[in-house]
Structures are given as C-alpha cells and as structure tokens.
C-alpha cells in the first residue's frame, strides 16, 4: 500500500466574492471541502486539478497561483496508515458552471443519490458568500488551514 496520498485542490472565487465548495457524502461521512482530488501516477499537480474539475463539474479551469502545500503530518481520514499531502491553487473558471449548484449543504439530486447507492460516494456544489466563509465552512483539517490563509490573503 502507498504510504502517501497526494491531493490537489482548487480555490475558485467568483466575481461576486463567493467561494466554491464541494459537499461530499462518502463512506457514510459528510464532508465539505474544496474541489479537487487525488493525483494519479504520471500526472502533474496542475494537470490533476484541470482533470478533477472536468471530471467532477465538467468545467474547464485555468490553474493560477499556488496557495499552500501541507507542511506537517496529516493522516488520512479514511486510511490512517497513509499520510496526506495536499496542494492548493487558486483557479479561474474558463466558462460558466453548468452543473446544478445547491443553496443548502448536502442537498443531492435523485441521480446523485443513485450514484451514492452504486459507489458509496456522491457530491454537490455550492457557493458560500465571502462574509459567511470561514474555516468552519470546511471539514478537513488541511482545508481549515487553507480557509484561514485565503481569508487573510484575499
């Protein structure tokens, strides 16, 4: 088993000063996080992020400024024997978002609920207003640190 799990996430802010969040139901756990996912073998981090946005949202993005890379030990929430290394970039949407966006956390369409039944995971997306966004908006420890960073920086 691989001892390291490299994750790449994008921070997408729109022109209305909102932050895009992914609400995931995975293995019976509810997690709010930044959009992105796992780095595949042979893939660069920016290419990973472009692929993840296309797979999850059918959205083309430009990967811009590097924001943060994990600089401390963080075990995986799902596989405690693995160390998580997360890399965060600011991203810019190159087109309008076409997937449904929700207003309420963990609101899933019938198709998304069917996906959960088949795979044990599903996700929906929503904007959080800048004034309401904080480290409490996300679930995972590294995301919380990044939320603090972007609130200070932007």
Image (tube, grey):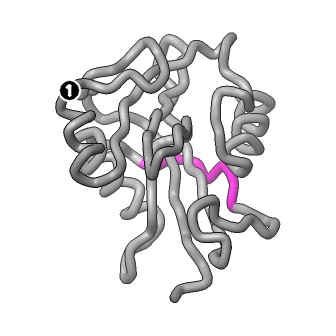
| Residue that carries the numbered disc 1 in the rendered image | 110
- Residue 23 placement (x, y as % from top left): 46, 33
What quarter of the picture does the C terminus occupy? top right
Would residue 67 be counted in the magenta stretch? yes
- Residue 84 placement (x, y as % from top left): 64, 67
Residue displayed at 23% across by 43% down: 115
Q: Is 88 displayed left or right of 28 in the figure?
A: right
Query: 126 or 95, which lies in front?
Result: 126
The answer to whether 128 is drawn above or below residue 37 in the figure is: above
Q: Is 132 displayed left or right of 13 in the figure?
A: right
Q: Which of the 4 image quadrants contains residue 128?
A: top right
Residue displayed at 66% across by 78% down: 81
Q: Secondary structure at mark 1?
A: helix
- Residue 10 placement (x, y as % from top left): 50, 45
Which residues are drawn in magenta? 63-69
Q: Which of the 4 image quadrants contains residue 38?
A: bottom left
Residue displayed at 43% across by 12% down: 103
Would residue 91 be counted in the magenta stretch? no
- Residue 39 placement (x, y as % from top left): 44, 69
The answer to whether 121 is drawn above or below residue 96 in the figure is: below
Q: Is 32 displayed left or right of 57 in the figure?
A: right
Q: Residues within 10 Å of mark 1 (few under 14, many from 20)?
A: few
Q: Is 21 displayed left or right of 48 in the figure?
A: right
């Amino acid at each position: 088993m691989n001892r390291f799990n490299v994750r790449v996430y994008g921070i997408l802010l729109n022109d209305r000063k909102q932050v895009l969040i992914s609400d995931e139901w995975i293995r019976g756990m509810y997690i709010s996080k930044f959009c992105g996912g796992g780095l595949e073998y042979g893939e660069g981090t920016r290419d990973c992020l472009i692929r993840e946005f296309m797979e999850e949202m059918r959205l083309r993005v430009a990967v811009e400024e590097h924001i943060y890379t994990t600089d401390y030990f963080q075990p995986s929430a799902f596989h405690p024997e693995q160390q998580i290394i997360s890399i965060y970039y600011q991203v810019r949407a190159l087109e309008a978002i076409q997937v449904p966006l929700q207003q309420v956390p963990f609101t899933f369409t019938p198709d998304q609920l069917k996906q959960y039944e088949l795979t044990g995971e599903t996700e929906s997306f929503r904007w959080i207003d800048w004034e309401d966004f904080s480290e409490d908006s996300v679930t995972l420890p590294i995301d919380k640190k990044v939320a603090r960073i972007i609130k200070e920086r932007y």
